[in-house]
């Protein structure tokens, strides 16, 4: 008897994943709930556990292939002898099901005309069939970049967006890379982008293409927050079991500003503006695999200690690759802190479909004028990137001033002023 291993539900708006690596080989003994394969989505890396004990049979989806929720990954055979066991006939995937796994090489393909004998559209999987219905592009007219020449989702999207018909020569890449000199080429290393990195690149470029993005700047005197932190950091950590950082103050300051300027907490849906009367704040976290943005949900209902605990927990999970998809969805506004890497100033890119993102930077002692006198103060540049389609310049400046006022007088955060 064989038990199927299938791709689990990946979460809201996550429609595919890439096989990162298999932890076992066909014929290896596995235990129930033991991690079998690593999947990379555009949001997180997750593990699929064994649904039963036995021996790993055929691996249907190989490393690097793209799969959809419910797709067959392989099988576990109970009581199998040695080697790669064949799954029982009753559980063997139907021929039309297997092509649902497409190659991750779909990114960067171009809609070339297909040679004679191209596969019929129904052989390329449900995602391709759906796109064929929505875009009118015939998969049979394309040269597939997937396994065995199958047309992938990326092929369909490239063909749908190409200005020339599918029968025309393949368009050049957006940026044609000049060939390296032979001596240089021998010292280069070519590594395929991970699923997460591909998605980061695509989403950041989409944000630039879709939103009317603009950035406004201000600076904030961090003296008061730093003094407060210095005074209470030991007792804070002793009572709450977490360190008192700056993110708790910034998160609470942002929420106050969002309440005063609701357009920054809104998003565009077609021809409507959706104002969100809740505050799910995304906190950008850098990892070895790329930037992820876990979300502090209903942050307005948390104390500064509650925010700090949540962020610290997210940081641990991000480093260990344990963030769940649910923890990274539904944000209404994002904060990113380039200051921890030494950044003095930057223009952060929107985390679509959000309409605002706040960039924090390094604290640097600079001369400023106070009451007619030049004083040295710890100053930080703040940057607000926003979607100018729904946020006016006056609203953006007002938002940033509200954040500045709250941080320079932290009592406002306690008194809700």
Image (spheres, rainbow, N blue to C red):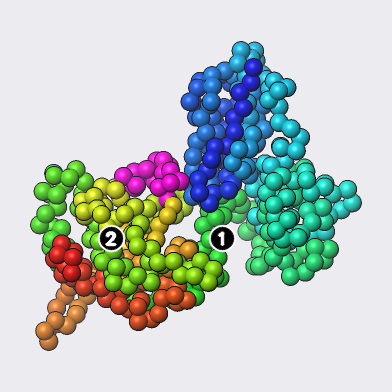
Q: Is residue 314 magenta?
A: yes
Which comes sooner in the sequence, label 2 or label 1? Answer: 1
Q: In the rendered view, does 128 fall on the left or right side of 360?
A: right
Q: Residue at x 10, y 57 (%)?
A: 231
Q: In the rendered view, does 8 fall on the left or right side of 415?
A: right
Q: Work out whether residue 383 or residue 377 is closer to the camera in this orientation and state it.
A: 383
| Residue 358 image point, x, y percent | 35, 67
Residue 202 shows which numbered tag?
1
Q: Work out whether residue 386 or residue 415 is closer to the camera in this orientation and state it.
A: 415
Residue stretch rendered in magenta on the structure: 313-328
Q: Is residue 32 above or below residue 275?
A: above
| Residue 322 image point, x, y percent | 41, 40
- Residue 185 visible from this viewpoint: yes
Q: Residue at x 13, y 44 (%)?
A: 238
Residue corresponding to mark 2: 251
| Residue 40 image point, x, y percent | 53, 44
């Amino acid at each position: 008897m064989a038990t199927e291993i299938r791709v689990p539900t990946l979460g809201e708006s996550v429609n595919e994943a890439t096989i990162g690596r298999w932890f076992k080989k066909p014929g290896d003994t596995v235990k129930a709930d033991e991690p079998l394969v690593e999947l990379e989505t555009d949001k997180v890396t997750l593990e699929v556990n064994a649904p039963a004990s036995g021996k790993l049979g055929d691996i249907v989806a190989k490393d690097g292939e793209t799969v959809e929720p419910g797709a067959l990954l392989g099988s576990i055979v109970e009581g199998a002898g040695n080697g790669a066991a064949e799954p029982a006939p009753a559980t063997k995937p139907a021929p039309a099901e297997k092509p649902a796994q497409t190659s991750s090489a779909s990114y960067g393909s171009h809609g070339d005309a297909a040679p004679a004998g191209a596969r019929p559209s129904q052989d390329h999987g449900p995602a391709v069939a759906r796109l064929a219905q929505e875009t009118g592009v015939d998969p049979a007219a394309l040269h597939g970049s997937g396994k065995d020449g199958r047309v992938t989702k990326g092929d369909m999207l490239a063909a749908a967006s190409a200005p020339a018909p599918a029968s025309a020569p393949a368009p050049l890449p957006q940026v044609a890379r000049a060939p390296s000199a032979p001596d240089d080429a021998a010292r280069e290393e070519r590594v395929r982008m991970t699923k997460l990195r591909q998605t980061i690149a695509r989403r950041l470029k989409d944000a630039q293409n879709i939103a009317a993005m603009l950035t406004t700047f201000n600076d904030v005197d961090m003296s008061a927050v730093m003094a407060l932190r210095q005074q209470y950091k030991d007792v804070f950590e002793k009572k709450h079991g977490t360190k008192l950082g700056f993110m708790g103050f910034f998160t609470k300051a942002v929420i106050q500003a969002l309440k005063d300027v609701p357009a920054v907490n809104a998003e565009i849906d077609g021809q409507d503006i959706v104002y969100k009367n809740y505050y799910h704040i995304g906190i950008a976290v850098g990892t070895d695999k790329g930037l992820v943005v876990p979300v502090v949900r209903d942050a307005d209902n948390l104390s500064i200690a509650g925010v700090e605990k949540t962020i610290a927990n997210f940081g641990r999970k991000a480093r260990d690759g344990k963030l769940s998809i649910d923890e990274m969805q539904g944000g209404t506004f994002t904060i990113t802190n380039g200051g921890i890497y030494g950044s003095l100033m930057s223009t952060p890119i929107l985390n679509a479909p959000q309409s605002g993102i706040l960039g924090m930077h390094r604290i640097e002692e600079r001369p400023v004028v106070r009451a007619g006198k030049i004083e040295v103060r710890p100053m930080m540049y703040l940057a607000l990137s926003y979607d100018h389609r729904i946020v006016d310049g006056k609203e953006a400046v007002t938002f940033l001033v509200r954040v500045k006022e709250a941080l320079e007088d932290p009592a406002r955060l306690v008194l809700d002023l």
